[in-house]
Image (spheres, rainbow, N blue to C red):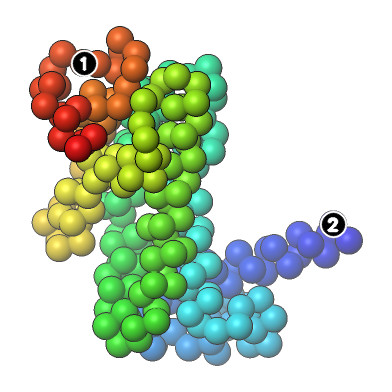
Amino acid sequence: MRRKLRVHASKRDAIVEAAAELFVSRGYDGASMDVIAEAANVSRQTIYNQFESKEELFRAIIDNLVDEFMAPLAKASRRTGIRETLIAFAEHTLELLVRPKFVALYRLALTETTRFPDFGPSIYEAGALRAQETIAEYLREQAQSGSLELADPFIAAGQFMALTGRDTELKALFGVESRLSPQEIRRRAKAGVDVFLKAYGTSDVALSPRVPKTARRALRG
């Protein structure tokens, strides 16, 4: 039974990986289920046994991306301080945001949303919303442990995402930036995290004197 599950998982992974590469190289319409099946070395029926539609397959790609983005939080040790954890997470996010594969899939999702109105909300739920909810859960746990003081973890998660990645995300999307040096990634991650912790942190480490006091009032409203 376990071997059978591993085989199914292996085929599913192969399908998702092949589909992601084909969506990027050929576009949404150009990557037919037959072409994806051939690239993944499976039958067309095998794909439909796993995914009811091309949209569901695209959602699975987005799910995998979110898993990759959220990996540092999933692996975060309770012994690691919140500032160190958030900086490592922000660095990881910034690195992924400028990767060609992510940018191409992001652009593709936006393009298809204009053609198929129902496509956008579905991909948003699988991607940005799920990411924000995952970050919110981590922030909620940190608030319960006394490291943060916040009323709405979900809103705080959105603010964290904006502070640490939104500018880079937009620059990558519009082709302004395609790569970042490790030093620049570190600088942006620390800057965003320190402003966030200035607003919500309760520890002495969080309250960096380099961040203006107005940051706390601005984020908390």
Q: CA distance from mark 1 to mark 2?
A: 51 Å
Q: Along the line of sight, which residue is nearer the eye, 44 or 86?
A: 86
- Quadrant that contains the N terminus: bottom right
Q: Residue at x 39, y 81 (%)?
A: 118
Question: Which tag is nearer the camera, tag 1 or tag 2?
Answer: 1
State which tag comes first along the sequence, 1 or 2. Answer: 2
Residue 198 in the image: state x and y as whole percent.
23, 23
Q: Along the line of sight, which residue is nearer the eye, 131 or 199?
A: 199
Q: Residue at x 28, y 73 (%)?
A: 110
Residue 130 marker: none
Task: Tell me: residue 134, above or below residue 84.
Answer: below
Residue 58 in the image: state x and y as whole percent.
47, 73
Task: Tell me: residue 199, above or below residue 1.
Answer: above
Mark 2 crowd level (few <14, some 14–19, many ≥20, 10 Å Cα): few
| Callout 1 secondary element | loop
Q: Along the line of sight, which residue is nearer the eye, 20 or 218?
A: 218
Residue 101 in the image: state x and y as whole percent.
35, 62
Question: Image check: 153 left or right of 193?
Answer: right
Q: Along the line of sight, which residue is nearer the eye, 144 or 111?
A: 144
Q: Which residue ends up furthest to the top in the rendered image?
A: 204
Which residue is under mark 1?
208
Q: Residue at x 47, y 46 (%)?
A: 134
Residue type at mark 1 is Ser
Task: Tell me: residue 185, above or below residue 146.
Answer: below
Mark 1 crowd level (few <14, some 14–19, many ≥20, 10 Å Cα): some
Residue type at mark 2 is Arg
Residue 2 marker: 2
Q: Are marks 1 and 2 in contact (CB under 8 Å)?
A: no
